[in-house]
Amino acid sequence: MQTRSLGTTGPQVSALGLGCMGMSALYGDADRAESIATIHAALEAGVTLLDTGDFYGMGHNEMLIGEALRSASSASRERALTSVKFGALRDPDGGWSGYDGRPAAVKNFAAYSLQRLGVDHIDVYRLARVDPVIPIEETVGAVAELVEAGHVRHIGLSEAGADSVRRAAATAPISDLQIEYSLISRGVEGEILAATRELGIGITAYGVLSRGLISGHFTADRRLAANDFRAMSPRFQGDNLRHNLALVDALRKIAEQKGVSVAQIAIAWVLSRGEDIVPLVGARTGERLAEALGALDVTLDETDLAAIEEAVPVGAAAGDRYPAAQMAHLDSER
């Protein structure tokens, strides 16, 4: 397994991480046994970074990962690193109630995550969205206290803008910023990426296949369950979906010429953006995991990259990456 470093202060991790959210929430129903088997397969293949959030399925995802770690081989378990997002507030009906970055809340969230995961420390701990009320310095300072106490190893950020990244880094060492980054989500490439690189902060890129939209497996006639986030996502609606799938068709031609899948070329493109970037793949089955891992063997030369840029230019996607209410929570979009 190829490895990359999460910034200058973070851990060495596998070049691809496994995003576990879809095993518990937001993409419709998932198979528990298949999910655990996929985590085991990822660990056995050398994937070390498991990404989750304490609000994925209201704790279900952390318990799922905890179960998978307990039943994994000792060698796999020792290699596994946990990346946990916290702070998103939910209600009993699954709704969203904002974000909480208060220091007391930070430590409360961490206590529950440690218990659900069944670990004695969290490797990277990060606020899911910047709290618009609580200064980022206070939130990061609380995580720094958890680091000092041994409950957390490294401090991460999520969907933070350049100013928030700088303020956080002035408070304590930051390993990485988790942010959406794909061929059709390239907002990070401006001020944010410049700031992280100046400060020696890595990027963990989620949504590298744009929630399956640019995986090559999504079709216009696919019916989404009511509990699937994509049923409300602007990029999966009507004319937007048809436009975006046309981009995928253009990308497919390039992939076919190289003898790889659309998903593999899309993941390989994110990998090519720099050694400081670690893509997270949201595979929920062994088949999808194997396909994603195959991207590590795809080499893109300058001709390939130019063809990809022509097929999917910057800003080519139709529709925002989240519904308007959720876009408003993104510090990275301000």
Image: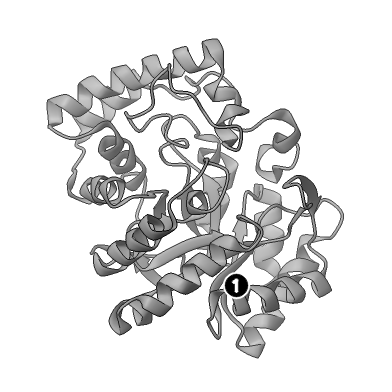
Coloring applied to the structure: one colour
Q: In this rendering, is residue 286 above or below 241?
A: below
The one of 45 and 308 positioned closer to us in this rendering: 45
Using residue 46 as the reference point, say whether residue 20 is left or right of it: right
User: What secondary structure is marked by label 1?
Assistant: loop
At x 32%, y 66%, the residue is 40
Q: Where is residue 75 in the image (x, y as percent from the top left)?
A: 29, 82
The one of 267 and 25 positioned closer to us in this rendering: 25
Tell me where residue 17 sits by quadrant: bottom left
The quadrant of the picture occupied by the C terminus is top right
Residue positioned most to the right: 133
Q: In this rendering, is residue 165 above or below 321?
A: below
At x 75%, y 33%, the residue is 325
Using residue 12 as the reference point, say whether residue 290 is left or right of it: left
The quadrant of the picture occupied by the N terminus is bottom left
The one of 98 and 11 positioned closer to us in this rendering: 98
Tell me where residue 107 sits by quadrant: bottom right
Q: Where is residue 184 in the image (x, y as percent from the top left)?
A: 46, 29
Q: In this rendering, is residue 38 above or below 328?
A: below
Q: Where is residue 165 in the image (x, y as percent from the top left)?
A: 65, 56
Q: Can residue 248 be seen in this view?
A: yes
Tell me where residue 288 sits by quadrant: top left
At x 55%, y 13%, the residue is 238
Using residue 25 as the reference point, say whether residue 329 is left or right of it: right
Q: What residue type is labelled 1?
A: Pro
Q: Mark 1 points at which residue?
A: 173
At x 37%, y 79%, the residue is 77
The one of 276 and 98 positioned closer to us in this rendering: 98
Label 1: how many Cα within 10 Å (few below 14, some 14–19, many 20+) = many
Q: Is residue 9 visible?
A: no
Q: Where is residue 91 in the image (x, y as percent from the top left)?
A: 79, 52
